[in-house]
Image: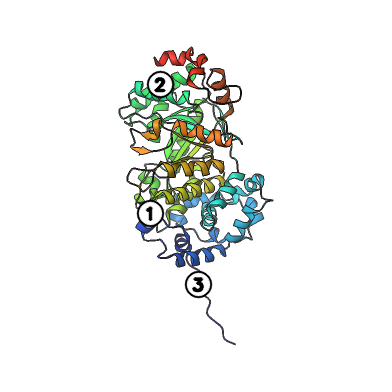
Amino acid sequence: MFNLPVAAPTPLPRLLALASPARSGDQLAGVAAESREQRVRAQQELADTPLSRFLEEPLVPYESDEVTRLILDSHDPVAFAPIRSLSVGQFREWLLDFATDGARIEAVSAGLTPEMVAAASKIMANQDLILVASKRRVVTRFRNTLGQPGTLAVRLQPNHPTDDPKGIVAAILDGLLLGAGDAVIGINPATDSVRSLEVLSRLLDDLIQGHGIPTQGCVLGHVTTQIRAIEAGVPIDLVFQSIAGTEAANASFGVHLGLLREAQQAALSQNRGTVGRNVMYFETGQGSCLSANAHHGIDQQTLEARAYAVARAFDPFLVNTVVGFIGPEYLADGKQILRAGLEDHFCGKLLGLPMGCDVCYTNHAEADQDDMDALLTLLAVAGVNYVMGVPGADDVMLSYQSTSFHDAWYIRQVLGLRPAPEFDAWLARVGLLDDAGRLRSPSDRLPFTRHALLEDAR
């Protein structure tokens, strides 16, 4: 009898990279499969890989990376026990099983690592990603309640290239008239300073508090600027920060886990929530680790999932994958952007995050608004918590294409979705929604023409 040699298993970082659906960022990093045949062989090997192997072989060394330490130190073996014996392929089948509902997925969530869910996503079709994500609802609360079944929220994004308060208020009014703003009214400041953040934060606070709008504001400055502003007495609802999946990439953003904990405690000390205490807002995006030269030879989608481990450590109110923002060097075209958006939403939901998506692209990518319509529709079917609302879908400060206030109402109508319940009630109270929850036509919005908010804007 001949003893045939057994091939050694492929190292996990390389296996995950080879199994990833094609994208330009992995090609740029030199980790992508060179052919479809090589990718399929890697996917077959990955499907046979035990889930437990991801606990035994960290992709980034434990000793040199605090994100790895967070992932492994916070892993819950009791939650993992029901699926411990499964391979990645068997885990996929378990997720797709009719008997596996949102409660069963939630029960194992603390036992899942980002690498496990990223691995599962790599052997799933788009419809698999949509189906599984649709089973899992993640509900968060601050001044309203997001993520409940039958709802879709919208971040009202009233950016202005010079932070002109009049221009920002005009965009906010435009969004409110179209039912946007329940996720957050979030401004990307053109200038990141305590003074600029104070002016814009007080503007948001005056609007929200002065007119009883059940929503939250956020000025998306650097977390250190926000901490200093809180210490100076500036009214801040949510604290924002961009995050990534390795310690080195986060360092390039000027953050670490200890700083994020400090920011969370500072926000909690404000006690500004009325229905809950989820105070953090995180944004992510495939390719951030590569752009920081901090990817450790790992594919961009797996690293994106690792960023979600950072996010879930802080019980965030919102997490947003800005899916096509970094550019075609990382996601080349509409097909890659669509796949990445579904992957990100799936991985975030499995890890227990309140996932939203900035369905977007830059003007030098091979994508257009039809691609964004398709991704918006698929994400809404998958149960995404919120999307962006940008005037005309064209951000005049950040210079990229996103989704508009009208796009949000398109998908709410198609799928019968409502805004967050508290915000929904406010829209009806001021005369913007009819009794059936439909947006009134401009000629029928007579109650709102007498609202103080409209008078203030004038």
Q: Is residue 167 above or below residue 41?
A: above
In the rendered image, residue 303, in percent from the top left (x then y), is placed at 45, 52
- Work out which residue is located at the far left of the displayed protein and give it: 162
Regarding residue 246, the answer to whether it shows in the image is no
- Of the pair 270 and 39, the residue shown nearer to us: 39
Marks 1/3: CA–CA distance:
28 Å
Q: Is residue 390 above or below residue 346?
A: above
Say which quarter of the image contains residue 277.
top right
The three-letter code of the residue at mark 2 reads: Leu
Contact (Cβ within 8 Å) of mark 2 with mark 1: no
Q: Could you tell me which secondary element the residue under label 1 belongs to?
A: helix
Q: Quadrant of the N terminus?
A: bottom right
In the rendered image, residue 373, in percent from the top left (x then y), is placed at 46, 41
Which residue bears the numbered disc 2? 203
Answer with mark 1 or mark 3, whichever residue precedes in sequence: 3
Residue at screen point 41% across, 24% down: 201
In the rendered image, residue 402, in percent from the top left (x then y), is placed at 41, 38
Q: Is residue 175 above or below residue 91?
A: above
Which of discs 3 and 2 lies nearer the camera? The answer is: 2
Which of discs 1 and 3 lies nearer the camera? The answer is: 1
The three-letter code of the residue at mark 1 reads: Gly
- Of the pair 436 and 155, the residue shown nearer to us: 436
Residue at screen point 31% across, 30% down: 161
Which residue bears the numbered disc 1? 25
The three-letter code of the residue at mark 3 reads: Ala
Regarding residue 357, the answer to whether it shows in the image is yes
Q: Which mark is residue 8?
A: 3
Marks 3/2: CA–CA distance:
61 Å
Contact (Cβ within 8 Å) of mark 3 with mark 2: no
Answer with mark 2 or mark 1, whichever residue precedes in sequence: 1
